[in-house]
Image (cartoon, rainbow, N blue to C red):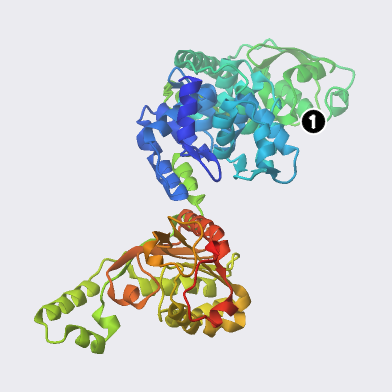
Amino acid sequence: MTNGNLSTIAERLHSRSPKRLWGLSPESVYTALAARSANEALDRLLSPHVRAEILRTNDKRNQEAVVRLHNWALEEFGLINDGEPTLLGMVVLAAEKPRPLVREIAVNRLRTAETILRSCNEIEESLPRREFDSLLADDWDETVIGPLLGSLGLVTIYPDSVEPHHERIESALKTQGAINAETAVAEAYRRILPQVVNVKDTQCIEDLVERVTGTTPNGAVEALEIVAKLADLPSGTVDPDDLADAIDEQRKEYEQGFQVLRSLLAPTSDCTLTRLETDTVIDATAVSNDLIDHGSDSLVAVLATVSTHPEFAAFDTQFITDRLSTTPYAIYRALSEIPGVDCEVRDDGVIEFASIPASVDGDDLRDEYTTHLITRCSSIQRQIDALSDASVSLGLEAVASDRMVAEDYAALDDGDVAPAYFTYTLVDPAALGEKKMKAYVGDSHELGRERARLRRWHENRPLGLRSYTVMTDRLFSLGLERELEDKVLRIMTPFDDDTFTEYVSQIRRLLEQGFELRLLTRHTKEPWEWRRLQRTLLSEIKDHRDRITVRTYSRFKEHRRVRSEMDFRDLGEFGIHGKLQTIGREEEGAVLLGSANFMENSYDWNPECGVYTERTQVVEAAIEFFDIVWDIAAADELSIERLQEVPDRQLVPTYYT
């Protein structure tokens, strides 16, 4: 894929706030790698992450573009080479916690990303968006790299500012160059071999790693350090034939070792061991402290055992090195300085005595040594069996696949997965009462049947439906039941009537708790309508008038300036038509929108429909829409005092006067 094609795809997948690449995350990159490793359909395995992203953004994008973006990321990050997982990719697949590894690899593979993050990390707080944009060198950085850093969770890019996530950035930067290439490769093999060759024995794995890489792993290296170094190296894959050869060679070495140990356990009767007389009895004082810091007694006990049981003249060196935590060469030097000792260490790990002192003051370790040999024989036999049954399979199981999907969903905010209800008004006989319905039906049989049908529908309506009255009450109650940070109640309604009296007590309580009421309505030229609003709402909350703002938005298409004596019926007019209520801000609040005015007809009689939800993205969009209309209607803000004394004449919108 060319940079131009990728830039086009990335542009289509941009999310605005925060800015990122839609559908891409450390979790989804891991899932894409697992799909490629298992030769499964990428779009199918990415589907859970796509669904999570739809919940997160309340948006949907082309899934083919998401798949192509992930294919690019796998290649660019060095996780895939010629369609196969690289050694680096296999380390990620085998990791219990792959998310920081994906971030680490991205920082190391994308040099411009590293430069950007180093600059961001020098600033303790968030930085202005323009300052972050100045770090992006070209269109490629702006279109791909910047949003990619947002997708990976290294920065959060808002329209006006950028928040660097310092802990993640520092973790990615500090591990660069922590280990050399040989150690990184050896530790990588140590992590993947248990799955690749289906061998669990730790010693088998370490011996195979050393045979394949030529380096002894120590197991103390962090996964971040491994992938940081591997990301700097050419993207190499694991050769299954080389592994099969290594397994065969290692098994043969174990078999040879087993034969040596068995010969030590059942030695031949021939013995050429010589006992030499020494001036004194050999005890712990004969061992040089310069060569053996501790364990002189153990070394003398070995001599005593061989002296008592000359069939052990060929002695397993590991018995001594394990007890003294030292090397065979150090043992050889210490023994060689003891009077009467003549020995050599063979390549097969056996120390062979030609002579020993005739008198040795030490414990006889025959039983313990015999147990040691039996245990080692049994252990090596298990290793031989393990490698005999070993097979090489590079189809590495993705250890954390289920967890990655679960963590992607767990990262969703509560507001991302809040329920949405279809909100409606349809004549409800039970809610309106027998008196109203009797007046409505009268003597009409048709209306009687209609009432019966409406009653049955309300009794059996789907669970996802809620009435406008119920959901308006729920929205207002949010502010009373929760401690909201943004104490603003927004109401957009072109028309209103006495319905405000049904909710005025809740509105009053909200104002008492510090809320602000913003009422946005269509400008009416009829004074009686303003007097009704004053009577039904404003007079009931007059003690909190400093927290109430009323604005209107009505415009004439043909004229910029009008006069009160004009016949307004001749002027084309547009204005508020939407019906919208919100409370709080996006992460904590709710929105109710639809066709219903704040009127009795809309709440009790007219067939109306809409949506109530606490979904973060929908609430955010509703607030942004309300606020832009609110801002441009600032010129037509009406003072509460003016509305208390409405003149008996037509009112002209302030915008035109």
- Looking at the image, the residue that sits furthest to the front is 565
When the figure is inspected, residue 180 is found, relative to residue 478, above or below; the finding is above
Is 525 left or right of 288, judged from the image as shown? left
| Up-down relation of residue 100 to residue 340 (above or below) | below
Residue at image position (23%, 75%) is 459
The picture quadrant where one finds residue 324 is: top right
Q: Is residue 560 in view from this perspective?
A: yes
Q: Quadrant of the C terminus?
A: bottom right
Q: Is residue 381 visible?
A: no
Q: Position of residue 299 (x, y in %)?
A: 77, 26
Kindly identify the amino acid type of the residue bearing the numbered disc 1. Gly
Q: Quadrant of residue 508?
A: bottom right
- Counting other residues with Cα less than 10 Å from the Cα at mark 1, is it few (<14), some (14-19), or many (20 or more)? some
**Residue situated furthest left in the rendering:** 445
Query: Is 18 positioned to the left or the right of 557 in the image?
Result: right
Closer-to-camera residue (19/604): 604
Q: Position of residue 311 (x, y in %)?
A: 64, 18
Residue at point 46% right, 60% down?
555
State which quarter of the image contains the N terminus.
top left
Front in this rendered view, residue 145 or 567: 567
Most distant residue in the right direction: 279
| x, y percent for residue 294 | 82, 31
Q: Is residue 362 left or right of residue 552?
A: right
Q: Nearer the viewer, residue 286 or 438?
A: 438
Give the image location of residue 545, x and y in percent: 60, 78
Under circle 1, the secondary element is loop
How many numbered callouts? 1
Query: What residue is pinned by disc 1?
Result: 295
